[in-house]
Amino acid sequence: MQELQALYQEVIIDHNRNPRNHHVMLDPTYQADGFNPLCGDKLHLFLKTKNDLIEEACFTGGGCAISTASASLMTEFLKGKTLTEAKTMFSNFHKAIIQNDHAAEIKLGKLSVLTGVKAFPARVKCATLAWHTLKTAIERQHEVASTE
Ligand code: ZN
């Protein structure tokens, strides 16, 4: 189990040092700002969709290692998914971290590396910020997401 946790740490460290999809998008379909005042994490999320399919996802900004790694992993996951699949994954991610729902955690795949934060309540909002920003982007364009 300790080995597994060490592996999870490696993934988070890697995505923080070399965040994937960390750049501006000039012609997004959806975008939103996210801010976590507890930690100071700040990011801007861009999505390009065609019909219901997410063709591109990227972000700028970031913050602590957890928030940056979470945004990096999330944008990696989103490419090629539908908006419906993205919303379902938001729900699974939220349930796994906030409600400690094991069934939801199993559905996370690679994203489960972030569920370790549930043992550290102060970091939960760092891990969920990118996902709240995604939800804001999809549901209400151009508004600032809040982790509250
Ligand atoms: Zn943070």
Image (cartoon, helix red, strand yellow):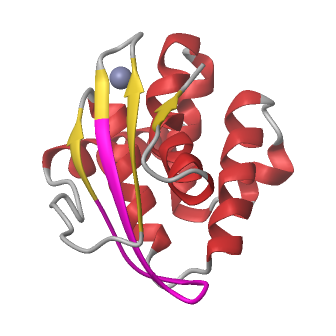
Task: Kindly identify the residue that appears in the image at 69 percent across and 61 percent down.
Answer: 87
Q: Residue 115's x, y, as percent?
A: 59, 38
Residue 57 among those drawn in magenta = yes
Q: Is residue 100 left or right of residue 71?
A: right
Q: Nearer the viewer, residue 130 or 49?
A: 49
Determine the image quadrant of residue 81.
bottom right
Task: Judge whether residue 148 can be spotted in this image.
Answer: yes
Q: Residue 16's x, y, as percent?
A: 22, 43
Task: Kindly identify the residue that appears in the image at 51 percent across and 11 percent down.
Answer: 122
Q: Quadrant of ligand 1?
A: top left
Q: Nearer the viewer, residue 74 or 59?
A: 59
Residue 115 among those drawn in magenta = no
Q: How many marks?
A: 0
Q: Is residue 101 above or below residue 112?
A: above
Q: Is residue 94 above or below residue 104?
A: above
Classify the position of the C terminus by image quarter.
Answer: top right
Determine the image quadrant of residue 25.
bottom left
> Dominant secondary structure of the magenta stretch?
strand
Q: Is residue 42 left or right of residue 25?
A: right
Task: Judge whether residue 2 can be spotted in this image.
Answer: no
Q: Residue 40's x, y, as percent?
A: 29, 17
Q: Is residue 79 above or below residue 139?
A: below
Classify the position of the N terminus by image quarter.
Answer: top right
Task: Kindly identify the residue that appears in the image at 62 percent across and 25 percent down.
Answer: 118
Q: Residue 4's x, y, as percent?
A: 50, 46
Q: Is residue 47 left or right of residue 127?
A: left
Q: Is residue 70 above or below residue 55?
A: above
Task: Kindly identify the residue that appears in the image at 25 percent across and 42 percent down.
Answer: 13
Q: Nearer the viewer, residue 2 or 113?
A: 113
The region drawn magenta spans: 43-58
